[in-house]
Image (cartoon, rainbow, N blue to C red):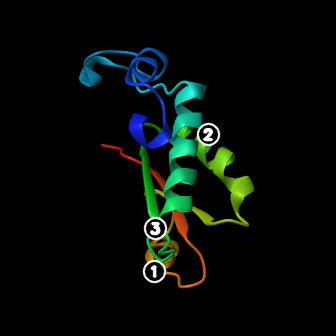
Amino acid sequence: VAELLGISSEIMHSKYSSCLNPSMSNAYIKSELHMLIHKLVLHIHENEPDIEKSILVFLPTYYSLEQQWRLLKPLESTFRVHILHGSIDTEQALMTMKISKSHRKVCVSYFSK
């Protein structure tokens, strides 16, 4: 990610990593990390010409999913942003998963146990 976005690995580690061992870190995502995810989504969208390929973003909590959705939602003229979560009905989830030939989809989801 650092190389793709032109960020030095030292800055990446110090600015975005809260813990050396990911299993020991908490689920809170700093606003800087949300902006990094946002930049990565834009980078993928701008550099992947096949708009039928969706971008799936997994986040650690529903709260972080909402935060990322709020950052991406203003870009709906560029791509469609969808939430994939157990609380949405099956029909809506299936519609989200269908390939679109007219626009790219960005799906934000979180892993719940």
Residue at 57%, 44% in the rendered image: 38
Q: Secondary structure at mark 2?
A: helix
Q: Return the x and y of residue 71 as percentages of the image width and height.
A: 67, 45
Q: Earlier in the sequence, mark 1 or mark 3?
A: 3
Can you tell which mark lies on residue 85? none
Q: Earlier in the sequence, mark 2 or mark 1?
A: 2
**Up-down: is 108 above or below 62?**
below
Name the residue tied to disc 1: 98
Amino acid at dot 3: Ser
Task: In this rendered view, identify the residue nearer to me: 102 or 68.
Answer: 102
Q: Is residue 75 left or right of residue 36?
A: right
In 3D space, how far apart are the residues under numbered discs 2 and 1 (Cα atoms)? Answer: 24 Å
Name the residue tied to disc 2: 67
Task: In this rendered view, identify the residue nearer to me: 91 or 48.
Answer: 48
Name the residue tied to disc 3: 54
Within 10 Å of disc 2 (Cα), the crowding (few <14, some 14-19, many 20+) is some
Q: Are marks 2 and 1 in contact (CB under 8 Å)?
A: no
Q: Return the x and y of residue 48 as percentages of the image width and height.
A: 47, 65
Q: Return the x and y of residue 18 as percentages of the image width and height.
A: 41, 16
**Up-down: is 45 above or below 49?**
above
